[in-house]
């Protein structure tokens, strides 16, 4: 495909994307397909000669769409939101075209520098302590990771390297194995200190955990994968109090801040702690500025060597929404969660199982786990809306997460009426 | 931004992308900026109110482009290629719009199933042994990782888990620390068995290493990050001989197979080895098919939980190029490398430092390392072309890698004339 065909097809794809998202409400949110459905619809090998673009785009509707769970349908209330916005999609087009691999400053200076500055912008939006910002000569700074798992692993490895060096310095006779046996990582049942758990969006008390970690010289990593985006609103910022005790902090703008996956934001107070654990310097990556102290080589901050120009997505989203637009978006979601909570409150058959702080409502029918499993089966079986469950203290609980960028009060009310009706059917059938 | 504005801006961005790539030859391949250049060009905080799209797109040219190393310029001969093609960009637009997070089959069945089938397509293109394919009931199969580093780490963790379990079964009294001390990972100076090293594209002998690993019950992981794409051509397939001894194999279509970053292809012979090391099953990710044996939940195959719909890029690229188109692309690059090799051969001042097997030529002026460092400094200083060096047996060597999708014989000849001239200037200055 040459550039003139791309000019045509790119515009067709732009309309395809806009049509898909404009019409998503009319699609069944959860697919009907059975495991293995797709293999029978495609050839068993790649074609020798090129296929026509028309055939491929037709196959998207014929083969792909029937097997898609529509995460951006306003009837999708499962898991947590996955960010999706037009500005981020435009930035991704540009990111693909530039197609640089930013493993060092020299590999594409703009890629590294925009990332550092965007992480400062975002850190300021969250009112992170100054120590986490890069500024012009800070010791800390931010980096985009692919996922919260990678951020946690990086923090764990940095903590291990730091603790190992301290032990080796104190007791030079210890073997590597003996040191490994001494190391302890404390975690909650969600791993590491968490602000906004996946199950029920609960919060660990940083003001209790933090001072203990600091006193005992323990690395404190905080994961606020979902909840972190809300901290840009002053009324939710208190949930982050205590972050000043942490060594590293992470949340996912690709969940709830309109920056398409992947974009997991991680900050550290001392960049040398991360870099010390991973420094990788083959000669083909050396460049004249690297020992100047002026630049950042992000390959030392992450597991993979390669990295895309992901900060473009942040730049486009922050500028096209503005901080006020992003705050309004968070507030709308929280408001809709409270609206659903209110509807549940009016119905004595239901109970709310965890405090509704942000965009997640955990609820169940008063009664057995079996009853609630049956309710969820009916909900997901009819496929008008989509939810997933969790376990809270041995109780089977339904999670209602406000997810879609386009979800409105009307969708939440329709979802409630649907759940209400299915609950009545179920309880009626039980009585008979 | 609503969908009607996106329809307009997406089309403008399509043209912006096509204009950028059409005109890339006219841009200086390596930027003039100094460290910290970007921070002074942007505000220190995100805007409160939205900025206009026109301002943002103007800032791309004003702020971003001056700091970009143009990896897709036909005068870029540094590192290794980073894939970039129009079909992959179209697929990425669709991937962004669907925006599903495919951690389980149920989270979007099409996302998982297309990936499994595309990895089979690609495995067949490489003539991988049947044991690596998923098919309808195979024990092996493929997965898209973010990078070769992640694939290697996954292989290492799977190998460690397998070896640890074997030791625990044989000697139940051993502590975890004692087991850890017994484990050995063998590696070359490039880590793990490598086909096509970064420095000089050399190849480990799998037919020697493989049988020893099998006899000693050692996990063998093969990394062919760059070279792997060439194995789709029958004349290069012999370089992969011995893969039948491996437990896992990985290469990066995002380097040399026209599938934009990130897309690192990994296969294993026994999927249970990977899954056993990482199984993660919270209730909110459970679904009714997961214990049926019929489906794949890719979250068990990788470090991150989230994953994009990356197989769309493979599907679009394989279908729009066809296998023949992809083979022609590989062959053109190899041919251009040999053309540069031929030009070097005619000039007795230069020596070629490693066999030219694929798209990389390692060369130097006969003489000191200092002389060659000076030559590279002149080359990269004038910024008409861009190269990076490597060290081979203590010699400072220049790497000339065929990278761009649009590079032609004329560009290689211009690059040669340029290098030739700078070498003459340098050697002339030395004589004076």
Image (tube, coloured by chain):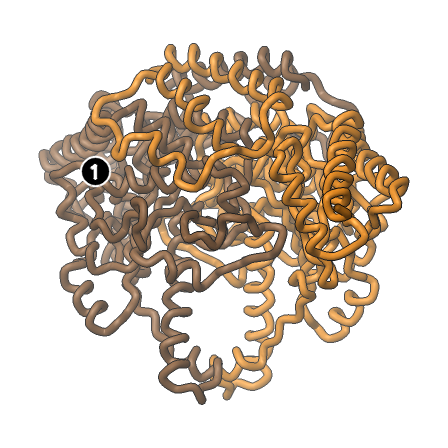
Chain colours: A orange, B brown
Q: Tell me the residue at 26%/44% (across/down).
A: B228
Identify which residue is drawn at 67% across, 57% down: A248
B184 shown above or below A269 = below
Lateral position of residue B190 relative to residue B54, left or right:
left
Crowding at mark 1 (Cα within 10 Å: few <14, some 14-19, many 20+): many
Front in this rendered view, residue B252 or B69: B252
Q: Is residue A252 visible to the viewer in this orientation of the structure? A: no
Q: Compare residues B232 and B168 and report the one nearer the observer.
A: B168
Residue visible at 61% across and 75% down? A184
Horizontal and vertical percent position of residue B53: 65, 17
**Does residue A425 appear left or right of residue B185 in this picture?**
right
Identify the image quadrant of the N terminus of chain A: top left
Vertical relation: B2 (above or below) A82 = above
Q: Nearer the viewer, residue A293 or B373?
A: A293
Secondary structure of residue under mark 1: helix
Identify the subunit bearing mark 1: B
Q: Residue furthest front?
A: A432
Count of numbered tags: 1
Percent of width and height locating residue A201: 75, 51
Q: Which residue is mark 1?
A: B232
- Within the image, what quadrant is residue B38 found in? top right
Relative vertical location of residue B118 with respect to residue B59 in this rendering, above or below: below
> Could you tell me residue A140's position as x and y percent?
66, 53
The answer to whether residue A31 is seen in the rendering is yes
Depicted B208 relative to depicted B265: above or below: below
Q: Is residue B232 left or right of residue A96?
A: left
For the point 51% across and 25% down, the residue is A94
């Amino acid at each position: 495909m040459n550039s003139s065909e791309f000019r045509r097809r790119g515009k067709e794809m732009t309309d395809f994307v806009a049509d898909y998202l404009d019409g998503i409400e009319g699609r069944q949110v959860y697919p009907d397909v059975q495991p293995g459905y797709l293999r029978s619809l495609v050839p068993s090998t790649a074609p020798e000669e090129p296929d026509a673009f028309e055939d491929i785009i037709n196959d998207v509707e014929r083969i792909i769409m029937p097997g898609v769970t529509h995460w951006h349908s306003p009837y999708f209330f499962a898991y947590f939101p996955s960010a999706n916005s037009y500005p981020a999609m435009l930035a991704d087009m540009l990111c693909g075209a530039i197609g640089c691999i930013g493993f060092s400053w020299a590999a594409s200076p703009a890629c590294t520098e925009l990332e550092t500055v965007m992480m400062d912008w975002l850190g300021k939006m969250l009112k992170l302590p100054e120590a986490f910002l890069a500024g012009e000569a800070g010791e800390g700074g931010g980096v985009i990771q692919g996922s919260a798992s990678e951020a946690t692993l990086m923090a764990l490895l940095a903590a291990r390297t730091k603790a190992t060096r301290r032990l080796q310095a104190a007791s030079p006779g210890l073997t590597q194995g003996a040191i490994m046996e001494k190391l302890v990582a404390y975690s909650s049942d969600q791993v590491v200190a968490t602000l906004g758990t996946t199950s029920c969006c609960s919060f660990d008390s940083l003001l209790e955990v933090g001072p203990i970690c600091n006193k005992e010289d323990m690395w404190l990593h905080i994961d606020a994968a979902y909840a972190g985006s809300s901290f840009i609103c002053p009324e939710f910022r208190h949930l982050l109090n205590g972050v000043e005790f942490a060594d590293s902090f992470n949340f996912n703008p690709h969940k709830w801040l309109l920056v398409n996956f992947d974009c997991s934001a991680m900050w550290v107070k001392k960049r040398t702690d991360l870099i010390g654990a991973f420094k990788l310097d083959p000669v083909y990556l050396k460049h004249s500025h690297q020992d100047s102290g002026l630049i950042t080589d992000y390959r030392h901050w992450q597991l993979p060597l390669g990295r895309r120009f992901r900060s473009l997505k942040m730049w486009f989203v922050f500028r096209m929404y503005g901080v006020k637009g992003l705050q309004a978006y968070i507030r709308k979601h929280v408001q809709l969660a409270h609206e659903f909570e209110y509807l549940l409150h009016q119905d004595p058959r239901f109970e709310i199982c965890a405090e509704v702080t942000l965009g997640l409502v955990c609820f169940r029918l008063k009664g057995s786990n079996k009853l609630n499993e049956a309710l969820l089966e009916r909900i997901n079986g009819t496929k008008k809306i989509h939810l997933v469950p969790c376990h809270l203290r041995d109780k089977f609980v339904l999670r209602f997460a406000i997810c879609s960028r386009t979800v409105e009060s009307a969708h939440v009310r329709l979802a409630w009426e649907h759940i209400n009706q299915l609950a009545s059917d179920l309880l009626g059938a039980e009585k008979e």
